[in-house]
Amino acid sequence: MTRYTLPHRLLHWMMAIAILSAIPIGVVMGDVKQGPFQNALYDLHKSLGVLVLILALVRVALKRSQGVPAPADELSDSQLRAATSVHHALYALMIVVPLLGFVANSFYGAAIPFFWLFTIPTFTPHNEDIAGMIFQLHTALAILFGILIVVHIAAALHHRFIRKDSVFSRMSVP
């Protein structure tokens, strides 16, 4: 197996869309005038976070059950170590960042809507001080997540357009 399976690739790209939507919404939602539009941005950001968490857990389960292709032959040992480190960090952040947002919202007393289909209730006592600390950690790790995503995209584009090797095509969809 030299390419990721279709389910792996579809999950990768669905998560990319969700994450690359959630991050800019998260950046602007606090600066928008209070009202229905801001509320919709918060709800959409929370919904995308839940979706990312669910897809990440499915992706981890798929990876553990079906495995993944061996590393590309074109990668040097240092590139392989760097890629492995970034991928492990991305997987951790795909789970930790949404979980922190979920827990912070619970402490804040804000239920989590899931794309206006249903609402996930809070599960902690109301404590805005704890919520604020967790939101700060959520934000800091989301920034790190964004930086690592840029590194990941830059590496993929480097393989596609500079090195012109098979690394990029392993995760491409068709």
Image: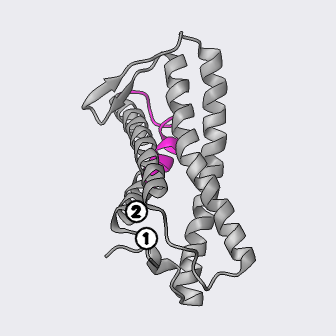
Query: In screen coordinates, is 93 left or right of 113?
Result: right
Q: Can you give x and y, in whole percent of width and height, for residue 79 in the image? A: 70, 75
Quarter occupied by the C terminus? bottom left
Q: Say which amino acid is labelled 2.
A: His
* Quadrant in the picture for the N terminus: bottom left
Dot 2 corresponds to which residue? 8
Label 1 sits on what residue type? Tyr
Seen at 54% across and 17% down, the residue is 107
How many residues crowd mark 2 within 10 Å: few (<14), some (14–19), many (20+)? Answer: some
Q: Residues within 10 Å of mark 1 (few under 14, many from 20)?
A: many
Query: Is residue 129 positioned above or below 173 on the image?
Result: above
Asked if the residues shown at circle 1 and circle 2 are in contact, with their CB atoms under 8 angstroms apart, the answer is yes
Q: How many numbered marks are there?
A: 2
Q: Which residues are magenta?
A: 19-35
C-alpha span from label 1 to label 2: 6 Å
Q: Residue at x 64, y 53 (%)?
A: 89
Q: Position of residue 153 (x, y in %)?
A: 55, 69
Picture disc at residue 146: none
Identify the secondary structure beneath mark 1. Answer: loop
Residue 84 spot, x, y in % from top left: 65, 64
